[in-house]
Image: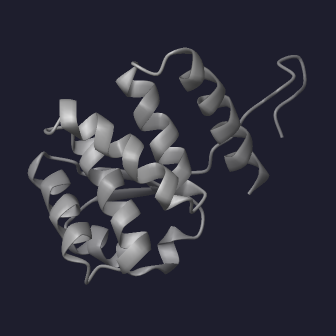
């Protein structure tokens, strides 16, 4: 959606100014996953995991990116998603559309608390939220 792309553009702009910021690196990678650009997400999330291998969130997004490329049968997707669960990742904010995929069934089976999530950005802070 347009909101996801706006969020991605903002994260990328900030990342260009601070490429060593791993939290920001993960945000850009997660946004790429959300918009279906997994080939661009994977190296960013990998960069985070090289420094923070025990990051539940980074493992979760790496699993989602690998799932998008190869489905849950993908050994890589399952390895990262399982690692996220082991690291106590129990809450997932799903982007629109993911609830219809097999990933949703995985999260339910593993006991995740699931909430729908959509990126939202208010450009004019004086304007009322819609």
* Image side of residue 2 versus residue 128, left or right: left
Q: Identify the image quadrant of residue 12.
A: top right
| Residue name at image x 13 percent, y 55 percent | 83
**Does the image show residue 116?**
no
**Way the structure is coloured:** one colour
| Residue at the extreme left | 86
Residue 91 vs residue 84, the one in the foreground: 84
Does 96 appear above or below 93?
below
Q: Residue 29, percent across and down?
A: 46, 44
* Image side of residue 61 versus residue 28, left or right: left
Residue 100 vs residue 64, the one in the foreground: 64
| Residue name at image x 54 percent, y 46 percent | 31
Q: Identify the image quadrant of residue 65.
A: bottom left
* Image side of residue 18 versus residue 2, left or right: left
Does 106 appear above or below 17?
below
* Image side of residue 49 versus residue 43, left or right: left
Count of numbered circles in the view: 0
Q: Residue 71, percent across and down?
A: 35, 80
Does 25 appear above or below 112?
above
| Residue at the extreme right | 127
Quadrant of the image containing the N terminus: bottom right
| Residue name at image x 22 percent, y 43 percent | 56
Quadrant of the image containing the C terminus: top right
Q: Identify the image quadrant of residue 121.
A: top right
Q: Residue 100, percent across and down?
A: 51, 79
Does 13 appear above or below 44?
above
| Residue name at image x 54 percent, y 50 percent | 32
**Does the image show residue 57?**
yes
Q: Residue 58, percent across and down?
A: 29, 43
């Amino acid at each position: 959606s347009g909101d996801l792309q706006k969020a991605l553009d903002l994260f990328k702009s900030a990342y260009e100014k601070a490429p060593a910021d791993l939290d920001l690196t993960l945000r850009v990678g997660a946004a790429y996953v959300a918009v279906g650009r997994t080939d661009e997400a994977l190296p960013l999330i990998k960069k985070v995991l090289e420094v923070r291998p025990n990051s539940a969130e980074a493992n979760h997004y790496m699993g989602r990116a690998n799932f998008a490329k190869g489905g849950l049968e993908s050994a890589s997707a399952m390895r990262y998603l399982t690692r996220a669960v082991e690291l106590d990742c129990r809450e997932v904010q799903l982007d629109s559309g993911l609830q219809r995929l097999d990933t949703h069934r995985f999260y339910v089976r593993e006991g995740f608390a699931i909430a729908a999530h959509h990126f939202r950005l208010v450009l004019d802070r004086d304007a009322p939220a819609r």
